[in-house]
Image: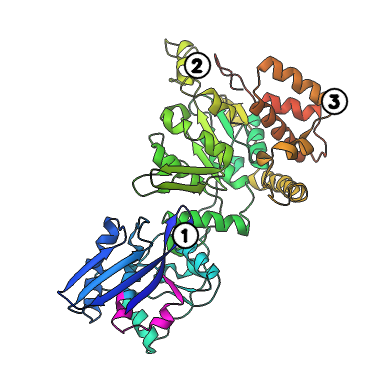
Amino acid sequence: MVARINTVAFQGIETLDIEVQVSVAGGLPSFALVGLPDKAVAESKERVRAALTAVGLALPPKRITINMAPADVQKEGSHFDLPIACALLVAMGVLPAEEMANYTVLGELGLDGGLAPVAGVLPAAIAANAAERGLICPAVQGGEAAWAGGQGMLAPRGLLDLINHFKGTQLLARPEARMAMDGPPLPDLADIKGQETARRALEVAAAGGHNLLMIGPPGSGKSMLAARLAGLLPPLTAEEALEVSMIHSVAGRLDGGRLLHRRPFRDPHHSASVPALVGGGHRARPGEISLAHNGVLFLDELPEFARGALEALRQPLETGRAVIARANGHVAYPARFQLVAAMNPCRCGYLDDPALACNKAPRCAGDYQARLSGPLLDRIDIHVEVPAVPPFALAAAPAGEPTAVVAARVLAAREEQRRRYARLSPDRPLRSNAEADGHVLDAVASPDDAGRSLLTEAAQRLHLSARGYHRILRVARTLADLAGSDAVRRIHIAEALSYRRILPGRVTA
């Protein structure tokens, strides 16, 4: 007899059905695990043996063979512990084979028989529900699995609880879906004094989902502005929350199995490597750009990042996907993020201040900015200068608009975009102006005659690429939405052009 248990492997946020097969046959006692396991899976033999001993059971002194089919797919992760243990218990007659066939199982076993959390419970639960099966997962992640709906969700604290449930001596309650805690309040935009141009650019970026680059000396408020962008963005929709939570689930970052409801804000250090930013590594995991999906990726001190790491952002910025190519296959993660970057104009940061600038100015500015390629800068919609605010101006400046007031305007603009694109692109509904392209962009952002004339002349003088030309149209469409205008007019084109700044010695568009 061969005992079988259903589980999953992960390819990005997608799941692949895996069947754990156990054969207990006569012969010299042995325990063989086959099916292309990695080190963590191979070590599960000892964890399973110790867990069974902890609940008062022992492996039969026979030839035990465990196969994980399909055998040509690499099996990674400790979540195979519980499926292997359950398959052994079915083979030993402890668990009923007919009932266990109706479940997808995953979980890591401790030496005492307890269950530890694992990555990927949410996508596994969704896949199990689609296959009309229940799910068995660790108790701390029951709330995560419950969001998938369906029937037969079991979340035991340990192996003994699971055995007792099927024996009828203990009843495992159905887990309840849980949301993440609100966390600390987000910083308020009213804290920013002065910087009216930068505040306006931040509002436009939030309203249209546009990428933003802030350039200014140290201490001018670039990081403060970026930190307040998350509070301006509209809340996640149910679909977006599920997408974000699935990525964080695969990365093992869902706290207590609670779904996220705030837009992610990721701010990796400039020492981050290519796998850290884009994803990958020995065991493929989502990178920062995928963890920032449907949210904000803030890169402070942009030129200090490794050149290769920054260039790796170019494709995801266009496609909204991070594709990790391997010799044995490809893994793709969603990466529809909003890039917000900050940088000094030069290495010392004080290019425009003769009293503080280094003796290499202005040549140092060109060398410093040369670390950023033109194609990368061309993918950033809004470039804005953030000059230093004198101390006397900080003391005299009145408080600006609070986050709540600006966020209301952003939400109204986003709602207008949602209605517009649901009508124009029902097959692939767009979420913001930043995603519009092709005939959809032509339909919504074609300027009036005066605006077209201005844009054509500016494109020739600034040597705009086709990408830069279309990004100006997207920003202009957002400016029109904030103004409540159905048409894109000359004034919107003019303001959008003002955000394609020319850095000292460099052309960014």
**Residue 47 is one of the magenta-drawn residues:** no
Q: Find the residue positioned furthest to the bottom.
A: 169
What distance separates the C-alpha of mark 3 from that of mark 1? 51 Å
State the residue position of label 2.
351
Number of the front mark, 1 or 2: 1
Mark 2 near mark 3, Cβ–Cβ under 8 Å? no
Magenta region:
88-105
> Is residue 37 in sight in this rendering?
yes
Residue 304, percent across and down?
42, 28
What distance separates the C-alpha of mark 1 from that of mark 2? 52 Å
* 234 displayed left or right of 178: right
Which disc, if any, is residue 15?
A: 1
Q: Quadrant of the rendered structure where residue 212 is?
A: top right
State the residue position of label 3.
449
97 is higher (above) or lower (below) than 37: below
Residue 113, percent across and down?
28, 74
Depth check: give the residue in front, 1 or 150: 1
Q: Residues within 10 Å of mark 3 (few under 14, many from 20)?
A: few
